[in-house]
């Protein structure tokens, strides 16, 4: 619920407030700052988030969890000190990279460490809550709270009630407020006492996991870039093309990012279950869960991407200064496909990370990171923002090809099923229908003005999306979905009969 409410608020904020209140350069500034903070905070975690999920089952049998969360708080603090030291040591070089094309960013470089700290512990507190099966409020804070706080900052600045300096401080402070809310909720959930943050070293030694935890944490530190490859696009663009073009990329990125929203919720739920199944060596269950999650993520992400794509022209027509951002249509297409790929196959990364073969993932992450760096550097020059998006898509394709081949050969785990081919066939037909609609029907509606354009978009979405969904149900792509549909129909008939 929090994810979808956040999407709704983010939709209004991004397309009807952000594009009106901020220039493309200012949009680019906020994007690069956030992406840089997320990237560095991911490094500063030192693999803590993955370690929390993987090793918590060995500590949760005690009321204080043997001080497990104390360890989870200390490691990121050490990581933050390390990252902060690197930023301080190489500050002049980093500023020089952006000084030519993005001088505005260099004016606020000093706020980056603060934003990194906020992003770091916001994620840590959220992960701690998730393993306690208390994810609703932290998700609400991240997906809704931050967007509301940012919306207030956009409006204050847009109506010139505050200066740009104050706006940037408020923008960064919104993540700090979210972090504090996450901490307060975690402490309230656990009936805060000092035992919770006092590490039980005796219990840690008795589990025999000390060496494994150290190796796993170091490994996850090295593989942290896997989930942050899309962030490299905006960082490269800011350095090579300037903040204005990065702003256009940002709006397109926001549009494509909606595709991944369902995975954020399902992923948070499925990871602890996958971790438990791997711990117990139940590979039949791992296979079942992996295929089920992958299939439903493919269905949902493709359907969301389809609805976005068939309405993209209408969206650019409606948003303020839409012509300034229409050049990002190619980014939406390419990044949308990358998001579909990542949403439907990322469960494979979880399976590998929780298995005893997790160290092999370092090779795949190295390939992913290297390909992302090289492709961004090579493609942005000739292709601009489309090049940044293409670099992300190709990097993910390389990564998942290597990962899934390894999972099958070493663990006999496969995420693929015939149902996925059915899903792709249905959606391919749906995209073909959209092409036909655009070719013959949309031109007739465009001659009637804005209201005709909206009516065309609404009718097209209702008809084509419903047809695609009906085709999946009729073809019995997912027994789970068909079961939900059957129960819904039966319930509706029962209510009708009762009346």
Image: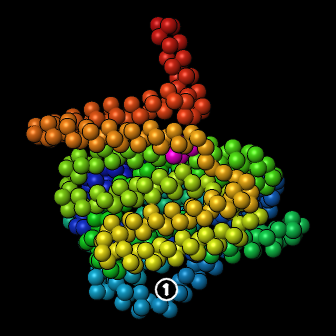
Q: Nearer the viewer, residue 18 or 322?
A: 322
Q: Quadrant of residue 183?
A: bottom right
Residue 466 image offset from top left, x and y in percent: 39, 31
Residue 339 image offset from top left, x and y in percent: 46, 56
Residue 480 image offset from top left, x and y in percent: 60, 33
- For the question of whether residue 189 can be seen, the reply is no
- For the question of whether residue 470 can be seen, the reply is yes
Residue that numbered label 1 is attached to:
87
Query: Mark 1 Cα within 10 Å, few/some/many (few <14, many 20+)?
Result: some
Q: Residue at x 37, y 69 (%)?
A: 388
Q: Is residue 359 left or right of residue 464?
A: right
Please determine whether, in this image, residue 171 is positioned above or below residue 481. Answer: below
Q: Nearer the viewer, residue 437 or 277?
A: 437
274 magenta-colored: no
**Magenta segment boundaries in residue numbering:** 295-299
Q: Residue at x 59, y 83 (%)?
A: 82
Secondary structure character of the magenta stretch overall: helix
Q: Residue at x 50, y 55 (%)?
A: 341
Please determine whether, in this image, residue 460 is positioned above or below residue 310. Answer: above
């Amino acid at each position: 619920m929090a994810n979808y409410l956040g999407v709704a608020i983010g939709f209004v904020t991004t397309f009807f407030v952000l594009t009106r209140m901020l220039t493309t350069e200012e949009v680019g500034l906020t994007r690069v700052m956030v992406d840089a903070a997320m990237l560095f905070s991911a490094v500063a975690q030192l693999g803590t988030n993955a370690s929390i999920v993987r090793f918590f089952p060995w500590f949760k049998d005690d009321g204080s969890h043997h001080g497990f969360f104390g360890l989870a708080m200390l490691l990121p603090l050490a990581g933050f000190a390390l990252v902060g030291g690197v930023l301080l040591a190489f500050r002049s070089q980093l500023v020089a990279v952006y000084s030519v094309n993005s001088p505005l960013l260099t004016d606020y470089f000093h706020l980056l460490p603060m934003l990194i700290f906020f992003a770091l512990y916001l994620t840590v507190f959220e992960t701690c809550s998730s393993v306690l099966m208390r994810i609703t409020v932290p998700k609400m804070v991240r997906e809704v709270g931050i967007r509301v706080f940012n919306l207030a900052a956009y409006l204050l600045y847009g109506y010139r009630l505050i200066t740009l300096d104050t706006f940037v401080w408020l923008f960064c402070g919104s993540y700090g407020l979210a972090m504090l809310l996450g901490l307060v909720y975690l402490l309230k959930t656990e009936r805060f006492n000092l035992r919770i943050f006092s590490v039980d070293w005796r219990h840690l030694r008795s589990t025999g996991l000390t060496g494994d935890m150290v190796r796993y944490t170091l490994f996850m530190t090295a593989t942290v870039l896997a989930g942050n490859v899309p962030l490299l696009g905006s960082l490269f663009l800011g350095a090579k093309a300037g903040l204005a073009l990065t702003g256009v990329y940002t709006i397109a990125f926001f549009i494509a990012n909606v595709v991944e929203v369902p995975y954020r919720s399902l992923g948070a739920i499925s990871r602890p279950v996958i971790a438990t199944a791997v711990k117990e060596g139940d590979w039949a269950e791992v296979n079942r869960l992996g295929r089920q999650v992958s299939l439903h993520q493919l269905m949902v992400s493709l359907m969301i991407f389809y609805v976005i794509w068939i309405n993209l022209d209408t969206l650019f027509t409606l948003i303020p200064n839409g012509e300034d951002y229409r050049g990002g249509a190619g980014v939406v297409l390419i990044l949308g496909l990358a998001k579909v790929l990542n949403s439907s196959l990322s469960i494979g990364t979880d399976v590998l990370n929780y298995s005893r073969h997790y160290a092999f993932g370092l090779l795949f992450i190295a390939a992913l990171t290297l390909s992302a760096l090289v492709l961004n550097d090579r493609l942005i020059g000739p292709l601009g923002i489309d090049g940044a998006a293409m670099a992300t898509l190709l990097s993910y394709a390389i990564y998942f090809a290597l990962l899934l081949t390894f999972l099958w050969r070493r663990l006999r785990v496969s995420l693929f099923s015939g149902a996925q081919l059915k899903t792709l066939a249905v959606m391919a037909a749906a995209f073909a229908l959209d092409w036909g609609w655009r070719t013959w029907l949309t031109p007739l509606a465009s001659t009637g003005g804005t209201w005709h354009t909206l009516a065309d978009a609404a009718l097209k979405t209702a008809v084509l999306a419903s047809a695609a969904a009906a085709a999946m149900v009729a073809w019995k792509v997912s027994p789970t979905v068909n079961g939900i549909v059957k129960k819904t129909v039966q319930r509706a008939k029962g209510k009708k009969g009762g009346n």
